[in-house]
Image (spheres, rainbow, N blue to C red):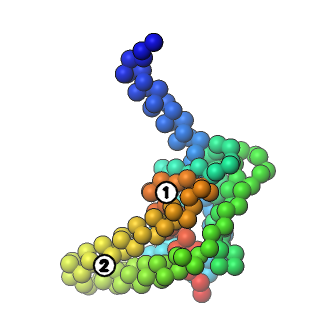
């Protein structure tokens, strides 16, 4: 039996919509004990990353039933800890730990470029601001790709989700 193209497309759209509802982060929090200080710019980036992440994300932990999920990000002994639980009342929790060592140099460079970018906005020529912004985006993309690779086999995420999570990892990485 042959299904009309419109029906197949409607079916694919329904499946995609269902996956978007099940494999997503519905709530996220940062372990505030891990965060020592924040500049106004960093706080703004944190707020935007969380807002954008909750608006649209793809997050599918391997071996866990479909969500949506609540995610808590924290640091413990030079490791990023992703604590994942179902948004429902299910008490189960999955913890995924990643070493921050592969991210250290990248995060340091990212913050140096961000600092230069925020200073340049005040009085630098547009070409310098644009160059710093391109460098900042490049480092952010590199961090997002690294995060996606490091989570492979543990949590499936799309690139936009990786970008927003990388921003939050940077916020957590700030130490006094």
Q: Is residue 156 left or right of residue 81?
A: left
Q: Is residue 72 left or right of residue 131?
A: right
Q: Position of residue 51 (x, y in %)?
A: 50, 57
Outermost residue, right side? 91
Cα gap from disc 2 to disc 1, whole angstroms: 23 Å
Number of marks in the image?
2
Q: Mark 1 = which residue?
A: 161
Looking at the image, which is closer to me, 140 or 150?
150
Residue at x 54% of width, y 68% of height: 168
**Residue 89's mark?**
none
Q: Is residue 124 left or right of residue 32?
A: left
57 up-or-down from 1: above or below: below
Q: Mark 2 = which residue?
A: 132
Q: In this orientation, does residue 118 appear?
A: yes
135 up-or-down from 68: above or below: below
Q: Position of residue 3 (x, y in %)?
A: 42, 17
Residue at x 36% of width, y 71% of height: 138
Instruction: Give the secondary structure at mark 1.
Output: helix
Instruction: Give the secondary structure at mark 2.
Output: helix
Q: Residues within 10 Å of mark 1 (few under 14, many from 20)?
A: many
Residue at x 30% of width, y 78% of height: 132
Which image quarter holds the C terminus? bottom right
Residue at x 49% of width, y 57% of height: 161
Outermost residue, top side? 1
Q: Residues within 10 Å of mark 2 (few under 14, many from 20)?
A: many
Q: In this orientation, does residue 44 appear?
A: no
């Amino acid at each position: 039996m042959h299904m009309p193209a419109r029906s197949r497309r409607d079916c694919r759209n329904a499946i995609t919509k269902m996956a978007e509802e099940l494999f997503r982060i519905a709530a996220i929090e940062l372990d505030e004990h891990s965060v020592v200080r924040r500049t106004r710019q960093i706080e703004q980036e944190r707020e935007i990353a969380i807002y954008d992440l909750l608006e649209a994300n793809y997050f599918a932990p391997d071996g866990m039933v479909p969500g949506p999920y609540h995610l808590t990000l924290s640091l413990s002994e030079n490791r990023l800890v992703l604590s994942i639980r179902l948004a429902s009342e299910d008490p189960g929790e999955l913890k995924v730990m990643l070493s921050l060592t592969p991210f250290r140099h990248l995060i340091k460079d990212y913050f140096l470029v961000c600092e230069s970018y925020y200073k340049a906005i005040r009085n630098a020529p547009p070409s310098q601001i644009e160059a710093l912004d391109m460098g900042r985006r490049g480092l952010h993309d590199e961090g997002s790709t690294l995060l996606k690779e490091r989570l492979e086999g543990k949590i499936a995420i799309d690139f936009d989700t990786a970008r927003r999570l990388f921003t939050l990892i940077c916020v957590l990485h700030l130490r006094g």
